Image (cartoon, rainbow, N blue to C red):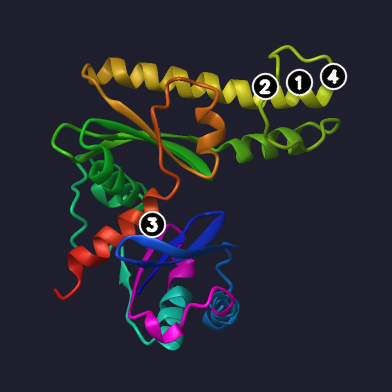
Amino acid sequence: MLLAIDAGNTNTEFAVMEGGEILGSWRISTDSQRTADEYGVWLLQLLSISNIERSAIDGAIIACVVPESLFNLRGLCDKYFGTKPMVVGDPALDLGISADIERPAEVGADRLVTALAAREKFGNNLIVIDFGTATTFDVVDEKGDFAGGVIAPGINLSIKSLYMAAAKLPRVDIRPTQSVIARSTVPAMQSGVFWGYIGMIEGLVARMRAELDRPVTIVATGGLATMFAGATSVIENIDKTLILSGLSLIYYRNKGK
């Protein structure tokens, strides 16, 4: 079995996979000060609850965009599972996808892994929208390469900024409103955030399609993908587990090398 770890800016997801199938997955807030032992105690309890034997895990792979967290995640794999993890970003690792941009080394590990998984499932000529801490719009070109994209503030960052910058505005949750025009403060904020975000999605996709000047398929991933896909016809496909699928693909591509 494979332990796949996606360490993002806000949350870190751990998944146990076998043959590309997710047997269990769990999230914890990303904290660069969390030790390997803290990860181990937490994760071993969850594995036990899910009836997954620690000894059955014989491989691990990590995608991490928080460099300070990587040391302890490596330590977790080594100390508690007896395996040296593959790490996306290691020059020796064959990702199976090229970054056709000006500075390939600057691309986040999560973006490349997600683009790879989307290409394997949906083919070339894609725009992949990932709803995370930031919302990214990434292009997979006609050759199947990662070809750049757009990085926008995530919707939770937008809500937090609004709440922190305006003294009289409360913190609100994310939800679609029945009408755009609201008659009280909280629905007005919810409308502005949600429908404003829909407008951004539709506007950016339209501009990207015009620049690419060829047919592209729009794929959405991330925890909020389903909510936004239900409010716009721009999003054509949803797969909330693309990054885990991509990590599995990369692991088995490099296993034994």
Q: In the image, is residue 116 above or below residue 52?
A: above
Name the residue beneath numbered marker 2: 192
Q: Quadrant of residue 233?
A: top left
Sort mark 2 into few (<14), some (14-19) or many (20+) by Cα contacts within 10 Å.
some
Residue at the image position 29 percent from the left and 36 percent from the top: 148
Which of the two residues, 32 or 12, is positioned nearer the viewer here? Answer: 12
Residue bounds of the magenta highlight: 48-70
Discs 2, 1 touching: Cβ within 8 Å: yes
Residue 36 visible at all: yes
**Residue 30, image x, y percentages:** 57, 62
Amino acid at the residue labelled 4: Ser
Q: Residues within 10 Å of mark 3 (few under 14, many from 20)?
A: many
Identity of the residue drawn at 21% across and 57% down? 95
Assess whether residue 68 is covered by the magenta stretch. Answer: yes
Q: CA distance from mark 3 to mark 2?
A: 32 Å
Q: Residue 177: x percent and y percent?
A: 70, 22
Q: Residues within 10 Å of mark 4 (few under 14, many from 20)?
A: few
As drawn, the label of residue 184 is 4
Which element type, helix, strand or loop, lies under badge 1?
A: helix
